[in-house]
Image (tube, grey):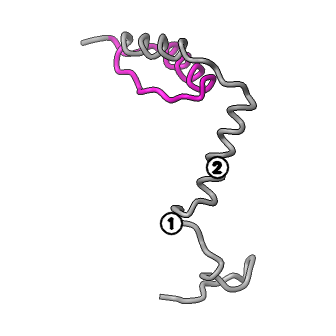
Amino acid sequence: MPAKPTGRQLNYLRALANRTGQTFTYPHTRRQASREIQRLKRTQSNTRIENSVIDREIADAIACGEADAARVRRDEVTGHGSTATWKERS
């Protein structure tokens, strides 16, 4: 049975992924972890500003996107704050 990745490898993978703005497949072996580390080391790092802009764009897309099925529309609610209620009750 191949050895599981070390904690140091996993921590380094997370740090590299954050720095480059990429994701990685969770490794099941030390060899897979080493390959992912090498792959992420070859990619160019994003600056903090770039990461901030990317995070903000993702958050805005989630909060304002038309595909957000959980979003409450203005025409569904009457009132505001603690007195808000659904216009139509089922």
Specify which label sits upstream in the sequence, 1 or 2.
2
Q: In the rendered view of the protein, which quadrant contains the N terminus?
A: top left
- Above or below, 56 against 41 in this view is below
Residue 14 magenta-highlighted: yes
Q: Name the residue under label 2.
A: 59
Residue 86, image x and y in percent? Answer: 60, 84
Quadrant of res 18: top right
Mark 1 element type = loop
SS type, badge 2: helix
Q: How crowded is mark 1: few (under 14 residues within 10 Å), some or many (20 or more)?
A: few
Residue 36 in magenta stretch: no
The residue under the point 65% across, 39% down is: 54
The segment highlighted magenta reads 3-29
Disc 1: which residue: 69
- The residue type indicated by label 1 comes to Ala
Expressed as whole percent of the image width and height from the top left, the position of residue 7 reads 49, 16
